[in-house]
Image (cartoon, coloured by chain):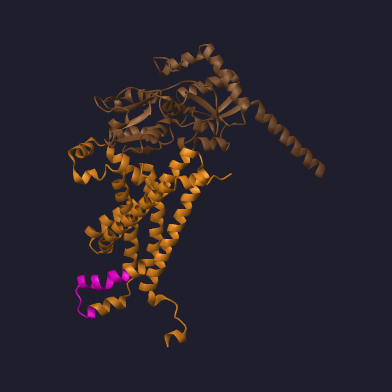
Amino acid sequence: MIRRIVLMAALAALSQSALAKDWTKIRFATEGAYPPFNMTAPDGSVQGFDVDIANALCQQMQAECTWVKQEWDGMIPALMGRKFDAIAASMSITEDRKKKVDFSDKYYATPLGLVAPAGSALRPELTSLKGKRIGVQRGTVADNFATRFWANDGIELVRYAKQEEVYLDLAAGRLDATWVDALEAEGGFLTKPAGKDYAFAGQTIFGRNAEEKAVIGEGVGIAVRKKDTELKAKINKALAEIRANGTYDTLRKKYFAQDIYGE
Amino acid sequence: MMDWHIIVDSLPQYVDGLWLTVQLTVLSLLAGLVLAIPFAVARISANPLLAKPVWVFTYFFRGTPMLIQLLLIYYGLGQFEWIQQQWQDGSRFWLVFREPYGCALVTFALNTCAYTTEILAGALRATPHGEIEAAQACGMSRATMLRRILIPGALRRALPAYSNEAIFMLHGTAIASTITLVDLTGVARNVYSQHFAPFEAFLFAGFIYLLLTFGLVGLFRLAERRWLAHLQPRKAVKDAA
């Protein structure tokens, strides 16, 4: 009897480790509220650039991928808590996040931009933003940037759970501007009817000095748990392949006119 | 495993969050209670023109989740161009609804007012007939009777039920963080997303809520000892003598 239990336990452990290692099934998570990178369709499914890229990677890896929707601010804890295996949610590769999770190579790079009513004289600089109410999505690179460089100097930072809520409040006149991923703002707001009276105020930036560059990070990657090095390697390999075979560009053209990969 | 340095580092934020939570709770409870007294009197009135509107009000606010009410008032109202125009024109009244603080206070006050109205209306209905007859025998007018007998008696009787409502309200203010307010829960959410440490961030916030709850329970116990003294178990004869 005991021998049987031990045997079964050993078998179970074996099959589990086998399952964990071959990565034929991958659970991806995204937020579904960050158009055009990820958004929720009326039927509840997720779509967008992040989703298309991850699906293309899965096809390349011959893996079966399923999607989980997860609130942005709980994304990394949920990954570490094994709620899913990878995050494809426009997550920038930053030093802070690298302490907790591992990232694939970047699949695009995006600057930050200040979105304000068209013709606004605001600029993404400390002196220009003093006394203004600036909306950011909590836990994003824009939030980290504003918290680090602006929040202690008389700029009122208002944090939201979703970027869509920031746009709502900007349109309602509760905010002076939003500090946000520029491609997100372009595709998710400025080119939509709701954003027609708004524009970037000043230049969009990738980081004007080493300090800013460190906060903004090197681009956007797919996050995996630190111990899943094999999955990370597979994703990187597949990413290089879809970049080479033209799939990446086809998908990119669906959403963006110009190249967004960066150099 | 647990990293309490995160909490120590963000302690000043927690203090600010605590202060906001206390403000929201106390102000909304006060406003709700003050409004609830006339509403409760109207609610038990024989005149349907007084009773029905109050019934509709309490029915709506008790029948829908407070989160929905808050989102309606904050994001919903902000969508109307007419209201945006009022904000630009600087209308004092409508500007309250531009600020998340104002929206939260109004929502919480109306919500607790609805529940308190029903609690007080129940307590008013439970007034012993003898008290009313005695008041009539003394020749009190209806208004005097309300002021001297009915309302003070109802407030006393409502105390135990009301203490529950106050605690619900304290916990209910946690949803203020969904409209950008940085109350205790808002601080916990910020700390959580900055350090990816859900356990520490929320456990500490929960601990503070627990202390606040104990504080409220203690206050209501003191209040009951004072105003419901006639309902306390009789003390030993030695004390009485």
Regarding residue B65, the answer to whether it shows in the image is no
Whether A38 is drawn above or below B63: the answer is: above
Q: Is residue A8 magenta?
A: no
Q: Which chain is orange?
A: B
Q: Is residue A246 depicted above or below B15 in this figure?
A: above
Q: Decide which of A16, A131 is in the foreground and name it.
A: A131
Q: Residue at x 56, y 14 (%)?
A: A241
What secondary structure characterizes most of the magenta part? helix
Relative image position of residue B203 (x, y in whole percent): 50, 49
Residue furthest to the front in view is A210
Magenta stretch contains residue B145: yes
Q: Quadrant of the N terminus of chain B?
A: top right
Q: Quadrant of residue B120?
A: bottom left
Where is residue A103, by image quadrant?
A: top right
Where does the image place residue A235, in percent across and percent down from the top left? 57, 22
- In percent of width and height, residue A199 lies at 29, 24
Q: Viewer-proximal residue, A41 or B182?
A: B182
Chain coloured brown in the rendered structure: A
Q: Which residues are magenta?
A: B136-154
Can residue A6 be seen at all in this image of the molecule? Answer: yes
How many marks overall? Answer: 0
